Image (cartoon, rainbow, N blue to C red):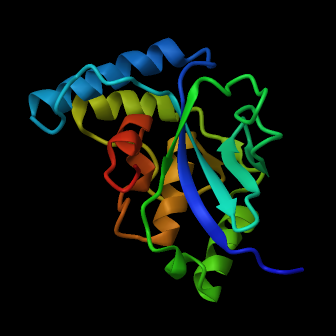
Amino acid sequence: MKKLKIKTIYLGLRKGGSIMYPLILLFMRMYIIKKWMLKKVKSPFKKIYNHAFIVIEYEDDSKFVLETNPNVTFTTFDGSHYGKGGKYENNIILKEFIYDYNKINTTNNYHKLHDFILNKVINKKYEYMNFIYQAVYIITGIWLGKTYDNKKWYCTELTAAFINDIDEELFKHWYKENPLTLDLNENFK
């Protein structure tokens, strides 16, 4: 089977669709107001998303989604909730990951990335404790959650860890990320 080069990687963000959405929205709004008061964002009135995922587009234009749903899955974009006719098709944005794709497509990096998907995260369970960890972190600035790779993942942690596998300088604390920090990150346009 021929190795397909990765053409583009997108950060996907979704709004709504979760029973936890109102609570996540509250904490994300607190987070952005805090950042705005510290002059780290221009406006506290940014649209807020509650779920993050990765879309990988290959050179043959096929797209695959890496996400927590609720276990970690890697499926075709069109067969996912986000593709044409999917229930979240109109509630998402895709932001391109700005990076040198020649570096990603080198044999070592390509295999490392797919090893991350196929051997480290696929079928792992969802980390529900992240809601508590994120709430405490947003309010106090103290991280009580895990700081290592384990058997459970939440959406933004998975997304940031995937990008971190490409370049360890981008998300040094990938386990602390939330949908807003990903959305505000300058590496996604």
Q: Residue at x 46, y 50 (%)?
A: 146
In the rendered image, residue 100, in percent from the top left (x then y), is placed at 45, 74
Taking 48 as reference, is 155 left or right?
A: right
Q: Residue at x 59, y 32 (%)?
A: 128
Q: In this view of the protein, which residue sits in the foreground, 6 or 170?
A: 6
Q: Residue at x 63, y 71 (%)?
A: 113
Q: Compared to 28, does 168 lie above or below?
A: below
Q: Residue at x 15, y 39 (%)?
A: 40
Q: Residue furthest bottom?
A: 107
Taking 158 as reference, is 138 left or right?
A: left
In the rendered image, residue 63, in percent from the top left (x then y), is placed at 72, 53
In which quarter of the view is residue 168 placed?
bottom left
Q: In this view of the protein, which residue sits in the foreground, 80 or 153?
A: 80
In which quarter of the view is residue 136 placed?
top left
Taking 85 as reference, is 40 left or right?
A: left
Image quarter where the N terminus lies is bottom right
- Could you tell me how many numbered marks the image carries? 0
Taking 161 as reference, is 133 left or right?
A: left
Q: Residue furthest right?
A: 1
Q: Compared to 28, does 70 lie above or below?
A: below
Q: Residue furthest front?
A: 60
In the rendered image, residue 38, in percent from the top left (x then y), is placed at 10, 34
Q: In this view of the protein, which residue sits in the foreground, 155 or 4?
A: 4
